[in-house]
């Protein structure tokens, strides 16, 4: 009996091939039922302004609690939904639920009105559907302003010569959405893609911080990325901040934002909204002005 196995941190990647295949089939054939029964929900993780430790927003992370299998690890079901070409259904469901959550909390008067939510988009969303039109429709239905939603696109999804994606990213930004690059440094195309897109924020992959304190080079690399981002007019957020030592370092080198277990783990709406209501928060960053750097260069 595998009921609840994943709740106890049982790692799906240790599972036998046969078991993985069974879970994969389960994900595909039970996906619509899971949406209908709200077995898939959002957990929210705070994103922090480094200087002040104020909350600048929350990342919406999908959680699937299956009656048969317990918590299914997100990385696993995301990958399966991508290969089954169902991922846009999940991502639009998450955006709809996030808009619902704005409304739910408004009704309870808990001050979530101003909160910014980052949602994750898959590269495939841009191919499988008219993602701009879909998101606009949901947003207007719930009367949520564009600047309340931040769209995260993972670096591994990007390439330098994808003019279609570039156009769509620019279209979202022109409409007032912030677009953030997720997991920067995890793929191969990182540096060149930065030439082609104007992201509002670069999220540095948590692997950069993992060796901090053990490997002298790790800190130098992070500092260089933060400096480079500033020079091209983009903000940086460090993912996976777990210790005060990492946090102090990020503060010293001027990394504007942080996210990680040190500040808060992903949690359901109610506790996330409660913790938010207690803190005063500043939600946006001033646009970076890169002109002073250009002057130095020329
Ligand atoms: P991500 O977008 O890079 O999200 C950050 C992941 O790091 C989350 O894993 C979060 O729980 C974890 N994390 C945050 N702080 C720390 C920390 O201090 N230490 C450690 N060790 N981990 C930390 P999660 O929730 O398992 O999600 C995994 C990935 O699945 C996400 O990575 C994202 O790429 C994807 N994902 C999650 N929800 C969605 C969704 O609704 N749509 C799409 N397309 N992808 C999603
Ligand atoms: Mg993300
Ligand atoms: Mg990430
Ligand atoms: Mg990711």
Image (cartoon, helix red, strand yellow):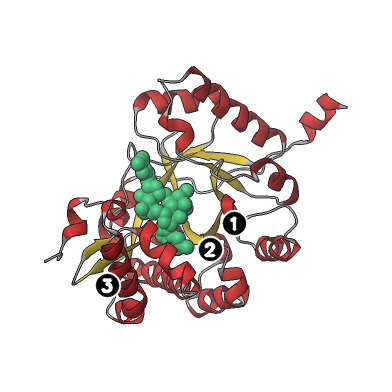
Q: Say which of 124 and 202 sits in front.
A: 124
Q: Is residue 3 above or below residue 238?
A: below
- Answer left or right for 113 relative to 275: right
N-terminal-most mark, 2 or 3: 3
In the image, residue 282 lies at what x, y percent?
Answer: 48, 45
Q: Which residue is mark 1?
A: 157
* Residue labelled 2 has its Cβ within 8 Å of some atom of ligand 1: yes
In the image, residue 178 lies at what x, y percent?
Answer: 60, 56
**Can I make out residue 115 in this image?**
no
* Residue labelled 1 has its Cβ within 8 Å of some atom of ligand 1: no
The CA span between labels 1 and 2 is 7 Å
Label 2: how many residues lie within 10 Å, few (<14), some (14-19) or many (20+)? some
Residue at 57% x, 39% y: name it.
236
- Answer left or right for 69 relative to 112: left
- Answer left or right for 291 relative to 218: right
Q: Which residue is mark 3?
A: 39
Q: Quadrant of the N terminus?
A: bottom left
Residue with the most extreme right position: 298
Q: Say which of 156 and 201 sits in front.
A: 156
N-terminal-most mark, 1 or 3: 3
* Residue labelled 3 has its Cβ within 8 Å of some atom of ligand 1: no
The reply to whether discs 1 and 3 touch (Cβ–Cβ < 8 Å) is no
Q: Is residue 12 above or below residue 260?
A: below
Q: Secondary structure at mark 2?
A: loop
The reply to whether discs 1 and 2 touch (Cβ–Cβ < 8 Å) is yes
Q: Which residue is mark 2?
A: 122
Residue at 21% x, 52% y: name it.
10
The CA span between labels 1 and 3 is 27 Å
Q: Quadrant of the C terminus?
A: top right
Q: Secondary structure at mark 1?
A: helix
């Amino acid at each position: 009996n595998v009921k609840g196995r994943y709740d106890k941190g049982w790692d799906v990647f240790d599972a036998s091939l046969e078991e993985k295949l069974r879970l994969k089939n389960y994900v595909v054939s039970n996906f619509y039922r899971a949406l209908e029964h709200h077995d898939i929900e959002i957990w929210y993780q705070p994103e922090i302004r480094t200087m002040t430790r104020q909350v600048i927003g929350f990342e919406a992370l999908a959680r699937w609690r299956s009656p048969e299998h317990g918590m299914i690890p997100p990385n696993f079901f995301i990958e399966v939904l991508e290969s089954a070409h169902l991922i846009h259904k999940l991502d639009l469901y998450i955006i709809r639920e996030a808009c619902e959550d704005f409304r739910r909390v408004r009704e309870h008067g808990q001050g979530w009105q101003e909160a910014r939510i980052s949602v994750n988009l898959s590269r495939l969303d841009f191919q499988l559907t008219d993602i701009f039109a879909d998101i606009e429709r949901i947003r207007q239905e719930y009367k949520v302003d564009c600047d309340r939603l931040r769209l995260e696109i993972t670096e591994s999804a990007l390439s330098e010569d994808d003019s279609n994606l570039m156009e769509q990213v620019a279209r979202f930004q022109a409409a007032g959405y912030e677009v953030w690059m997720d997991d920067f440094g995890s793929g191969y195309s990182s540096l060149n893609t930065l030439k082609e897109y104007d992201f509002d924020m670069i999220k540095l992959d948590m692997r950069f911080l993992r060796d901090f304190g053990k490997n002298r080079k790790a800190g130098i690399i992070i500092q260089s990325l933060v400096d480079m981002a500033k020079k091209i007019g983009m903000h940086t957020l460090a993912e996976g901040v777990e210790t005060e030592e990492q946090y102090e370092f990020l503060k010293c080198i001027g990394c504007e934002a942080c996210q990680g277990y040190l500040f808060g783990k992903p949690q359901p709406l109610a506790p996330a909204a409660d913790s938010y209501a207690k803190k005063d928060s500043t939600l946006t960053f001033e646009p970076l002005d890169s002109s002073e750097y250009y002057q130095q260069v020329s």
